[in-house]
Amino acid sequence: MTNQFRVLYREFLFRMIDLDMLSAQGDAGRLFGQFAGLLVYFSSMLGLGAFFFDARRMTPEKLLLTNWGTEHFLISTTMLVVGLFAVLSWDSTFLDRRDVFVLAPLPISGRTLFLAKVAASAAALSITVAALNVGTGLTWPMIFMPVGSGFLGLLRCYAAYWIAMFAAGAFIFCSVLVVQGLAAQLPRRRFLRLSAFLQMGAFCLFLCVYFLQPSLASPRALAAAGNQRLLATLPSYWFWGMFQALNGSTAGQPAIAMLVRRAWTGLALAAFGAAAAFLLSYFRTLRKIVEEPDIVPAARGFAWPLPFGNSLATAVVLFSARTLVRSRQHRLILAFYLGLGFTMVIFLMKALLAQQERLGASTGVLSHQANAPLLASTVVMMSAWVFGVRIVFAMPLELRANWIFRVTSVRKTAEYLAASRRPLFVLAVAPVWLGSAALLCSIWPWRAVLQHLVVLGLWGMILAYASLYGFQKIPFTCSYLPGKSNMTFAFLGFWVYVNLVAGGANLERRALDRPASFAAMAALLAAAALCVRWRTIARAKSEESEVQFEETMPPAILVLGLNRDGVVPLR
Amino acid sequence: MLELRQVSKCFAGIPAVDDVSFTARPGEITGYLGPNGSGKSTTMKMITGLLQPTSGKILFEGHPVERDPIAFKQRMGYVPEEPYLYPHLSGLEYLVMVGQLRNLPARRTADRIDGMLRLLSLHGDRHSPISAYSKGMRQKVLLIAALLHDPDLILLDEPFSGLDVASGLVLRSLIQELAARGKTVLFSSHELETVERVCSHVVILHRGKTVADDSIARLRTLMSLPTLEEIFSQLAVEQDTTAISRQIADLIRA
């Protein structure tokens, strides 16, 4: 029993990652490490902020406001990350078809399976919360502790911090389980279809709530009668209230008592619901899994009538589109990048609203004329789509089925690579460009729209060709080695990039009113686009390029390519 | 004509296929036999180009296949040992994609796919995702994909795997029909009875080496054995099967 539990627990924990996606040299442990490392890095950066926090220069009111704001930010960030993790690990939360068929014939009791699955989920949740708070949970409680409470007060603050964080994480994780458990009571086929929408819905909900929730962590906002309903519906404030109560720093706010009640009630309901969902999945859903196929057999098919170039390009585009539409895993990863882009757009839109408020203009006046935030928004969304789609292209689906592309390779490598570039334009550049055209045409003068669409199209072209430089794969057919890119720097890079885009949008805004400036800008972008295109195509046509089906690790020893007498490589 | 000349393949220095030579002629069905791990599928993969031989030559109609792999692949059809297909595509979508990848004319390919799906009783399920297909249905999709471009060389690695009796009989007749029309057929199977009925010529592999390469009739005469199964047992089965089964039964009881 103990051995069975240990084996199953480990298996379920590592199954939070789809091992089928990794190449032969892939390492799930490394991917886990990278994920935890990213959270630890983020936490450490935030944790360092506590050392630069100088409470002595603040008035008591200002100190209270800053502390409360920071506490709420840390709690809501934990809830967001745990929520996203719960959505990403959706398919591995309950036993799936493969588990049922492999484990059912074995003499394993339902209790062991149940406990192993619950333990794996709890461990994953704990790792996420702990990694995300390892830095902040060490430093910020020293700031948050009530003034003059001494060493015991500090210990109490540490305990309050970690209890509140785990409670907030558990609440959001269990809530996702409840939704999943309820949906799982539908016929299995409908559940599988609905799952895709639920995952995307939860994803958008978490991001929107995180970025759009108002700041209510101040004595005045807490006391305002108009805010009570909002406070009662925002779980991040419930757990912020819980932290205040556990920390002993309620500052005589009656609203906090209501928040604490909500937090405990919500947590109890979510935990009860999650337990019920787990039990139902074992007593009811498992049988349904065995009896029904995973995907609904289609009564009729839809044949796409239009070609995307030659037959090879059409095959690759349709294959890519179908994979992206039908693979939940790839859709979710893409949604993550789109979510990042959407987040940046929200920030930019907030800036637009602030600008309107500053100018005293009525809502909508600024948005009905060309403005930098909206210009930047379309470019950011274009970038998020292109990067997101390009990244999911590198992740395979049913890797072992790629033999068909190898045995049917009856054309030159350059043709395959040209066909592999097409889906990025069809699935990323074109939708954003068309969506932006539709949106802007409805609110801006046609001339500004046309001008911006030229810029957006050229920028999309630059991004697409640049991201495809050296890409020698047919989308979704090459194995994936995690850990080749440095995620930390990628996120920092994205942040820097968004700031550059915002600066570029200001330049574009000014150029829109000056035909000469705009012509110069467009010419510059066109030249850059042609240059990037030429470079990417030249690399694809080079002699050493070949279609890649197995990702390889970079060599441990780099060959410098130094030549003796300029001819023979040194050995 | 397909010819293998002293072909070897090593994995980490260990030979999986060792100095194998044989010829498969047009109009003939060549059976490629051997126990598990003897190197049959590795040989098939080397012929298709999925693996590169460590040494030796593979020639098709007298030309090394690596000289013009594109031209070779245009004339070769392959049914792999394992039915690995894209489960999110429907059978029809998969076959249309194969036609497009092979650069076949769209209209003619659509007619061929439609006809073959009907003949192999898959037409009603053509829009269903492959994930919902049984092993036999997947095998049929692989077979259609291999024959879609009317290849001159047909490589079949365990093609009867998962097929029901009726489909198996159809496939057996189909292999004979294709050979009668001048195709070169190399087919690997563990079903020795089928091989004996269908093949005129067999190559038997053992531990990566060729241990027999002749017509079945000549092997029977040379070895004075009445069936292919007995010939195979003598050449490629080292173990005393009865003793092993007894030992297994004993081990379970222990």
Image: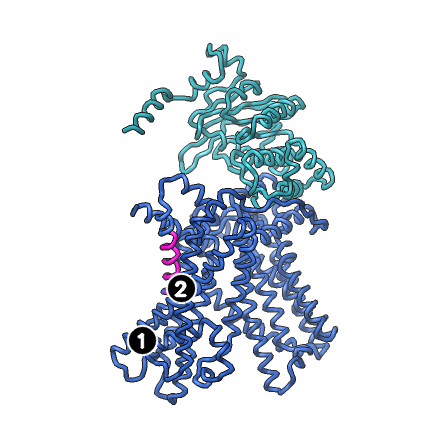
Residue A159: % across, % down: 31, 71
Residue A126 lies within the magenta run:
yes
Say what secondary structure mark 2 lies in: helix
Which mark, residue A157?
A: 1
Residue A371 vs B106, above or below: the answer is below
- At numbered mark 1, what does the secondary structure look like: helix, strand or loop? helix
Extreme residue in the bottom direction: A59
Which quarter of the image is occupied by the C terminus of chain B? Answer: top left
Q: Which mark is residue A59?
A: none
The residue stretch that appears in magenta: A116-129
Q: Look at 44% across and 26% down and name the residue there.
A: B35
Q: Which chain is blue?
A: A
Chain letter of mark 1 equals A
Report the colour scheme: by chain
Q: Residues within 10 Å of mark 1 (few under 14, many from 20)?
A: many
Image vertical order of residue A457 relative to residue B250, above or below: below
A500 to B250, vertically: above or below: below
Viewer-side residue, B194 vs A179: A179
Task: Please give the name of the residue rendered at 72% of the width and 37% of the height, measured from the top-left corner.
Answer: B111
On screen, residue A190 versus residue A267, left or right, reads right
Q: Earlier in the sequence, mark 2 or mark 1?
A: 1
Residue A544 x/y as whole percent: 56, 48
Name which residue type carries label 1.
Answer: Cys
Confirm whether residue A362 shows in the render: yes
Q: Tell me the shade of chain B.
A: cyan
Residue A236 location in percent, x, y? 44, 72
Q: Where, quadrant-wise, is the N terminus of chain B in this rendering?
A: top right
Same subunit, labels 2 and 1: the answer reads: yes
